[in-house]
Amino acid sequence: MNDVCVVGIGIHRFGRTDGVSGLEQGVVAVRQALCDAGVEWKDIQFAYGASDAAGNPDTMVEWLGLTGVQFINVRNGCAAGGSALFSAQMAINSGQFDLGLAVGFDKHPRGAFNALPSEFNLPDWYGEAGYMITTQFFGTKIMRYMYEHGISSITLGRVAEKAFRNAVHAPHAWRREPVDLATIMSAQMVSDPYTKFMFCSPAEGGVALILASEKKARELGKPIIRLRAATMRTRPPGSFEVFAPSLDINRGWSATKLAASDAFKIAGIGPEDIDVAQLQDTDSGAEIMHMAENGFCRDGEQELWYAKGFTEIDGKLPVNTDGGCLACGEPIGASGLRQVYENVVQLRGDGGGRQVPGKPKTAYSHVYGAPGVSAVTILER
Amino acid sequence: MRFIAERLLTDDTPPRLIGGRNRVSGRIVFPCPSSDEYEPLPLQRHGTLWSYTIQRYRPKSPPYAGPEKFEPWPVGYVELPGEVIVEARLTGVAFEDIKIGMALELTQIPLDSEAHDPVMIFAFQPKDPGDE
């Protein structure tokens, strides 16, 4: 099996870019990544592209060049970007290819995602009654978690406060103004216990990663950043997912726990060995719950972790160093790849005002989406 | 007055939700899947609140079929002991009085309280202490 390295990264700023299509934002990211890797489009042997709502990624060959490259489109909910990356690394891992692209982009209308029951194997009445709402899931999941594990509302606020504070230093982030805790806590309630600052918004953006075999990476003379693990998993019995008319009495694991434990096993390291992490934070409680689901702390310990600042840039495990989904918004196809982009920035030491001190060597990324899909990567410098 | 969908409620008075029990594993779900792997199972009418939130903005239409005029409503998951945890609207309780663990019973409410001939949905309300 070939080791897989990330040799080029590119990003189109997240948020709202009127007049530029999602696909064009993806193209901007690809060109930047090619330039960063020091390769040309004609050198790319294969591509996987992720988009949920902004068109077929393969059509970007019109802009990039009609080289006849193999280009596969991936649509996999919020794990689309992670799935594209997972597929791309397999192509190199197999030994068949040496240089390829994983790209993700999206452009969603304003407001909450507009999901239809039929797309999720659900009856029409479920949507008619008003339950096809992601924020309801986020609210009910954290409400139960707070009840079971003693997490307070102020901790939810601290997650959001950190996100906006970190994003000040991330040029690709959308919301780059700090917001103080009091403002976060007293803002308009959207889905209890969450105020509007505790939810991310659907947004726009594009991210591209150039992957290479280690041999190719050395030829290119790039710093070696290895993809030690990339996993993608679906839900086990007893999980709690978006758009669930019922839940099992016997509670079980989650797709996240499966993807995380697999990734650590493949990489041969544990959560304690990770120096920086990007965790899916569609809502501030998601970051809290995903801390435990990914194995970084035990259920309930987050209360102390956030009070003590353990997840700050200079803490023992910096989490969502670019402000995560809360500050970047969530263009579905691009979101998981943004996390990996940010991890490469951190491992290269290029984080500027948000750089994690102490030259981090390992970086972790995690996405989660409906209805129970999760993708994890572990990078090592 | 009509119910939002068929095959969700039994003909009993008062009606019960119809779940589905997997013929092999015994796993209970709601609603009852149409596949042969599940047999219909009338669920108990009483349970406890497992979790909840308040829907404070109007869901997008489609698919939402509720009235244009929007008032926030509570929605939760209700644990029917030994059976399954079902998602449903909560009714007859002030937002600040909603507590995880509270005893609830099945009822029906109109999707649009001002409609002339309303579509009804299932909901749970605080249990009347005298009702068993």
Image: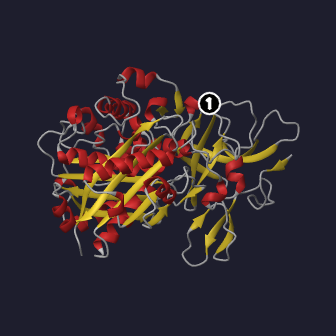
Query: Does the rendering let one see residue A115?
Result: yes
Q: Which amino acid, mark 1?
A: Ala
Q: Position of residue B125 (x, y in %)?
A: 66, 41
Chain under numbered label 1: B
Farthest-out residue, left: A358
**Picture layout, residue A84 above or below residue B25:** above
Look at 44% across and 30% down and name the residue there.
A197
Is label 1 in a helix, a strand or a loop?
A: loop
Q: Nearer the viewer, residue A130 or A350?
A: A350
Task: Check disc 1 and report the residue beneath it.
Answer: B94
Q: Quadrant of residue B52?
A: top right
Position of residue B115 in the picture relative to residue B55 (left or right) = right
Q: Which residue shows up at 63% across the image and 60% down it? A: B30
Q: Residue at x 52, y 57 (%)?
A: A59
The N terminus of chain A appears in which quarter of the rendering?
Answer: bottom left
Residue A253 in view, yes or no: no
Q: Nearer the viewer, residue A240 or A201?
A: A201
